[in-house]
Amino acid sequence: MTQAKEKEKQHATKVGVYICHCGGNISDHVDVEAVRRRLEKVPGVAVARTNMFMCSDPGQELIAEDLKNGVVDRVVVASCAPSLHETTFRNAIRRAGANPYIYEHANIREQVSWVHHGAAATEKAATLVEAAAAKAGLLRPLTPIRVTAARHATVIGGGVAGLSAARDLADRGIPVTLVEKSPCLGGQLARLDRIAPTGERAPELVRALADAVLNHPHITVFTDAQVIATDGYIGNFKLTVRQEVASEAFTGTEACYIPFSGMRPAGPSPSEPREFNLETGAIVVATGFRSYEPRQGEYGFGDFASVITLPTLIRKMAEQDTEGSFLEIDGRRIRSVAMIHCVGSRQIPGIHPEDASGRLNEYCSRTCCTATLNAACRIRETHPGTRVYELYRDIRTYGRGQEELYEQAARDGVVFLRFEPDQAPEVVRADPTDGYPLKIRVTDTLTFSENLEVPADLVVLSTGMEPNDVSDLVEMMKLPVGVDRFLLEVHPKLRPVEMPVGGIFVAGTCQAPFDVGETCNAAGAAAVKAASLLAEGHVELDPFVAEVDAERCKGSGACVEACLNPGALALVEMQIGGQTVRRAQVTPALCLGCGACVAVCPENAIDVCGMTLSQYEAMVDAIVADQVAADALR
Amino acid sequence: MTVPSQAKGNKILVLATESCAYPGADSVGQAHSTYPTNVYILRVKAPVLFPERFYLDCFRKGIAGIIVMSCGEECPYDGAYHALARRLDRVYQAMKAQGMDIRRLRLTAICTVCNRAFLNEVNQMNELVQKPAAGEPGQENG
Amino acid sequence: MDNSRNVDFDAVVIGGGIAGLQSALDLADQGYTVAVVEKDASVGGKMIRLSKVFPTLDCASCITTPKMAAAAHHDRITLFTYCDLQSLRRTGGMVRAEVQQKPRYVDAHKCIGCRQCEYNCPVMVSDREQGGFSPTKAIAIPFSNAIPQIAVLNPQHCMLCGRCEKVCPTQAIDYFQEPRSFTLTAKVALITTGFEMTTLGDKPQYGRGRIPNLIDALQMERLLAPHGPYNRVLRPSDGKVPDRIAYIQCAGSRDKSMGVSYCSRVCCMYAIKQAMLLSGALPLADITIYYMDIRAFGKGYEQFFQNAQAMGINFVKAKVAAVEPGPDGAVRLHYEAQDGDGVSTAEHDMAVLSLGLIPAWNPEGICPLATGPDHFLESPRPKLSPVATVMEGVFTAGAAVGPKDIVDTITEAGNAAMAAGKYLAALRASSARKHLVA
């Protein structure tokens, strides 16, 4: 496969151009037929066709037929954004028996018909398709790079998502290493008691999962451990793991469950910190969430000892596990408890103050409504003397069995008060004559916006979820983060558990708030992608990597110096024309395809396959072509 | 049918990175915002691929303005952004030497949801290229 | 997609909507062979019939068609469309699915999807795929992006005039086609049978479907779809462009009188999405959503809701008690507003009922699967394995196991494929062991 720009030009290619109406999405603003007529006349374009939906079966069939009949040998589809359908059309070309890399995409929906109107839209669409056709004429068939993949996966995080993904992969026969930062397995689930709405006991769920993982022959678990360095690429990652000395000595010969911490694997742990390397084919990031910590003074938190968070309430109730007419917390009899929803969630710019780093949690934390109702019902059930007030914005009992919990709370006499975000309740010290330490002032929209005062012995803040701080991993592995600071998947429906870096998957609440069942679904979805990837023992990578034209290369080494991924480019000795010379050589699996080398070559001897400089130049020529014609008439 | 709003000779070339700026431009489309039709977006893996002469050639061919929309600090290729910034400095030098208005080449960072920033960039460049000014690119060879 | 080639598979997937397609793809990518049994003439389920999807506002077709095409073209996936499941049993460690293919009156092997029959058929029929707003023919391709592209003849409306038979270039029309029964065997089954909407006719207070310009949300999806019946949003009774549009939330959910006491989980978000699309299509229109609680709980959903408020969509916290026809085709709503005035009345040019979700399939008499009080399938371990069922080797995903949006459905479908894959791997391992012992 030698680079041969002259040959590229000599070889007369037959470009097929296929323009999509997108059911009106494009054709309402772009005269698709006019574009087709214009393209038909472009030299090198063999056919130009249109279809209502190019992505549909009949649309794809149009391309396949032309390829099979030898009418075309290069393909341009003008349709929506390439992120949606570039793969679709490459696959259609492959199925037709042609090389999928003879394909170029023209984006005339997101970048034309949805932003421009009238004749100018048609003009621009035609120009963009001409540019794509110009590039397509210079495309060469390419072969994907086949890389052997280590049949091993690494799961980062030992909460429900990590445990579940590790077990899934191991059950498929794939060896797994699980790395957990804390001394225990179980994550945030271990900090809960009874799970809404089914009433299952969190410790039992954690035990069941952790037991399965710890006893699995294909899983190795490291607690007190963190990934501190990453290297390599899909199928061939190299991780450095550092395991600390356990904070408390634990030498148990059997794993044991520590309430509100989780499952402690059998000791002994290393007596000195150690670092070791892992070779792994795929990575599942399952680093979970932490509970929102209210600001000092937020709803009286930190000002009054009797303002606590929901996780604190759950723990205190579980630890005492008493019955009796009144709930008791820290030895105090609680006659009235007020639970405030959406603390640290659904924050609105201009209403809620930003945190120290200028951020707001604008998202809904999904699980707190049901968790709060669950706690309320539990209090009413076991301590019928304790009155419960819920102060909420919307009750989001969306899941199965959750609405029933809401109904049960109402039946059990829980009092609901609804507030608007700009009229947030105020937690203040009550007058000594009131007989209660605190009271909450609230404008209740359920009673025609009446101003009410709720007396309380205890105020519980339904704190939301925040992603754990994984900035080190984000930095090392180049993981994208959304505005909500959760890890950001490639696409929520097309590739919901994938990170843009091949071979890295995301599972559970590091991606978004989820409940336990939803987390297990996410873990399974991530595991199935990793299992599919590692099933074959090798992976195929895009061939968009640098390629050296050894005939042109003079061995200046400029490219090696400019290369951004050490090891991808090197000067090596080779025989050319009976002489030993030093020439640049690419290691394709390591090449990122960024093109840093292309710009610096004095001989123009290196290019990135599928996106060569001459291809870009041809596109620019097509874009200015009408201008050139106009200038000629001047 | 409206008259095409674009006069000849004021085309703006956008080099948009496939992981940030290009989806960012798509996001502008998904929001059905509108911007001048003389903006032509090319999808690139990393603009660090283009040598100095590519930019100068574009101007010579008649492109009126170039916006390099990179990923900025989010760049997936470690070090590429700085190499790119250094290269564009050299292009600016060459532009100055040829008496060209260096505002016609812009380096900026656009993320996948930077709709407003994208619109600002293309509108500002459009304003610039609409008024013929001293040192109009392309003149030196004309 | 040849229906007769093979009847032995690793997995059989019942239901070819987005859940079934995603499960099938994730199983096939692991190396397993999969049969997908779909009751409709096309795969794609409810999702392919939608306009755009929240919270990204991607066009539904653009997300669904790649998965439909990928499944249709996958070497290890076989689609069986227009097929009813008659029974599903486990015998001798295998799953046996008895399937009956309904007659299309068109030979699936001969039809090339050229639509000549459709163009020449003289009988106009109300098109269910377009919300009943526009006509189709008595013989037609189900809809433009259907897979497979095979015409279906509607025997209730066909006059047997013979024109389609004359114009068909491949002699594919077969007026005498009979239902065809066959058995599929597999090692595992996945139930991804999805949902239906509660019907307009169920609630007398909402006019039992007889109030003009009171439509359901799926009909509005068609009005908003790029290839919808009118290519724009018009009021069905008189073709007027509506200025005042209302959404009635929980119309069929959280409502014991409808037998649906649960939350249908998706209606808040689809109503907000439609309201946003409407305000894009009709910038001057006044759009009001009457709601009980806004349940925008998923990733990016709350921000989507906040955007809708910023766009000027009105949210009124109220339960609509009754709907009646108003003057000039208007729809009159009686509701109790929570912010004060007691019972109020409002008139809108058009109103949309945000109907709830009910299961599309009842296992009774077909296979011994358990359902909950809400009639959806039930997992014995809803937390650690939401995709398990009470039958060994039978898994489930998507709206079959409770109302669910597309994002959650796709993730759950992946997990179902993982669970089924694990079961198959264990079977393989144990049969390999037996082989060694023997």
Image: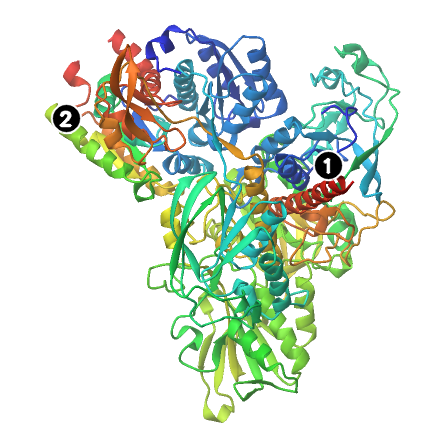
Instruction: Where is residue C90? Give x, y as percent.
Output: 83, 44
Quadrant location of the N terminus of chain C in the rendered image: top right
Please, is residue A25 above or below residue A31 in the view?
below
- Residue designated by label 1: C10
Q: Residue furthest front?
A: C437
Front one among A441 and A518: A518
Q: Residue furthest bottom?
A: A433
Q: Which residue: 61% across, 25% down?
A: A56
Both marks 1 and 2 on one chain: no
Query: How far, Cα to Cα, is label 1 from label 2?
Result: 66 Å
Q: Is residue B130 visible?
A: no
Front one among A87 and B6: A87
Front one among C50 and C372: C372
Look at label 1 and name its amino acid: Asp
SS for tag 2? helix
Which label sits on residue A126? none
SS for tag 1? loop
Q: Is residue A166 visible?
A: yes
Q: Which residue: 30% across, 21% down?
A: A606
Chain under numbered label 2: B
Instruction: Where is residue B26? Give x, y as percent.
Output: 43, 35
- Residue designated by label 2: B94
